[in-house]
Image: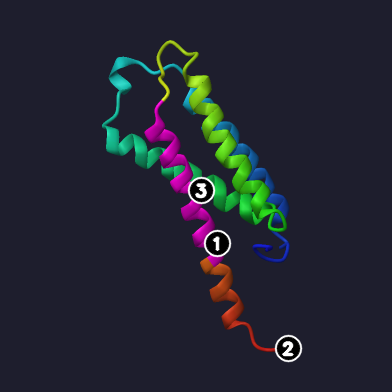
Amino acid sequence: MTMNATSRFEPQMKRAFWFTSLVVVAAALSPQGPDQATVVLSDKLVHAGAFFVLSVFGLKAYSTRPTLVIAALFVLGGSIEVAQGFTATRSQEWGDLWADCLGVCLGYAAIAFLNRVGTAQKPPQ
């Protein structure tokens, strides 16, 4: 199933996807001081929000490969959690991985909904 026909904004979406991916990985692996400790709920919202944005950009950038995008984002979330186990100031958490996966699923649902609404509003050809 393709998410949508390729659009004229595909190059910008690809740049946004890869830039956001780098920012998410850098933020997830950067040292965290004691003053940066977050409330658990807000931490999970940040994870879900970041992966929501990544999935929206990824699914728009690579609209003909949604399964690959989703799988890659699940692997990215898991890889970040594994890598955090090797840092001195971060820790691995199953809750973070679940929040990442939730963000990806919500992003997929949002794009699918928008594509369905867009298709319904197009006049018949």
Quadrant position of residue 2:
bottom right
Which label number is shown at residue 34?
none
Q: Main secondary structure of the magenta part?
A: helix
**Outermost residue, top direction?**
88
Which label number is shown at residue 104?
3
Q: Position of residue 110 (x, y in %)?
A: 50, 61
Residue drawn 51% across the image and 54% down it: 107
Observer-side mark, 3 or 2, equals 3
| Residue pointed to by mark 1 | 111
Q: Which circle's residue, 2 or 1, is located before the other in the chain?
A: 1
The amino acid pointed to by label 1 is: Ile
Q: Residues within 10 Å of mark 2 (few under 14, many from 20)?
A: few
Q: Secondary structure at mark 1?
A: helix
Q: CA distance from mark 3 to mark 2?
A: 33 Å
Where does the magenta region start and end?
93-112
Residue drawn 72% across the image and 58% down it: 64
The amino acid pointed to by label 3 is: Val
Q: Secondary structure at mark 2?
A: loop
Q: Residues within 10 Å of mark 1 (few under 14, many from 20)?
A: some
**Residue 81: within the magenta?**
no
Tell me if label 1 and label 3 are in contact, CB under 8 Å. no
Q: Position of residue 52 (x, y in %)?
A: 48, 48
The one of 4 and 93 positioned closer to us in this rendering: 93
Quick check: 90 left or right of 56? left
Q: CA distance from mark 2 to mark 1?
A: 23 Å
| Residue pointed to by mark 2 | 125
Q: Secondary structure at mark 3?
A: helix
Quick check: 54 left or right of 10? left
Q: Which circle's residue, 1 or 3, is located before the other in the chain?
A: 3
Number of numbered discs overlaid on the protein picture:
3
The one of 6 and 66 positioned closer to us in this rendering: 66
**Outermost residue, front direction?**
94
